[in-house]
Image (cartoon, rainbow, N blue to C red):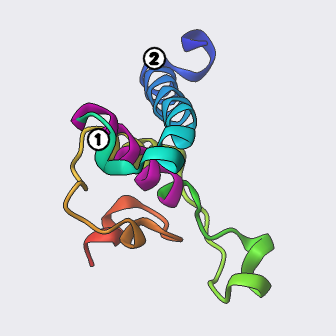
Amino acid sequence: MPAIAGTRHYKIALAVRQTLATYEELKDMIAMLGMAELAASDRQIVYRARRLERFLTQPVFSTEQFTSKPGRLVRLDAALEGCDRILNDDFADYPESALYMIGNIEEATR
């Protein structure tokens, strides 16, 4: 609810949720027909969703021993900024792996 989380947070969360839900719906079609058979707009949603999934896999303290990556605290505004920029295709030219296990989105550019 925007009254609790704030309007920006709420809008970004809804957009992330919708993108990931659409990706889930497309997974069966991708498995049967492949990515090439998807409409260009659906492929774009898939690419965004996969980048969001990687970005949302952030290094947390409880997984240090399994990932060999030190846990980090990521501020809420930094996480929102990253999600917003991914949704706006600011990182469309970056490999998905650049977004995996990072803290803030700027780390993907290094």
> Would you say residue 28 is visible in this rendering?
yes
Using the image, determine if residue 96 lies above or below residue 27.
below
Instruction: Give left or right: position of 18 versus 110.
Output: right
Sequence order check: which comes first, mark 1 or mark 2? 2
Please name the predominant secondary structure of the magenta segment in the image: helix
Helix, strand or loop under label 2: helix
Could you give the CA–CA distance between mark 1 and mark 2, rounded to whole angstroms?
Answer: 25 Å
Residue 106, position as x, y percentages in the image? 31, 64
Location of the C terminus by quadrant is bottom left
User: Which marked residue is nearer to the observer: mark 1 or mark 2?
Assistant: 1
Q: Amino acid at mark 2?
A: Thr
Q: Which residues are magenta?
A: 40-54
- The structure residue drawn at horizontal position 44% and vertical position 27%, both measured from the top left corner, is 15
The residue indicated by pointer 2 is 7
> Would you say residue 79 is visible in this rendering?
no
Using the image, determine if residue 2 lies above or below residue 78.
above
The residue indicated by pointer 1 is 44
- The structure residue drawn at horizontal position 22% and vertical position 37%, both measured from the top left corner, is 40
Residue 25, position as x, y percentages in the image? 55, 31
Helix, strand or loop under label 1: helix
Residue 81: mark in rendering:
none
Location of the N terminus by quadrant is top right
Instruction: Give left or right: position of 13 versus 87.
Output: right
Relative to the observer, which residue lies in front, 88 or 21? Answer: 21
Relative to the observer, which residue lies in front, 77 or 30? Answer: 30
Instruction: Give left or right: position of 69 versus 97.
Output: right
Residue 62, position as x, y percentages in the image? 80, 71
Residue 37, position as x, y percentages in the image? 32, 42
3 inside magenta stretch: no
Using the image, determine if residue 50 lies above or below residue 95.
above
The residue carrying pointer 1 sits among few (fewer than 14), some (14 to 19) or many (20 or more) residues within 10 Å by Cα, namely some
Q: Amino acid at mark 1?
A: Gln
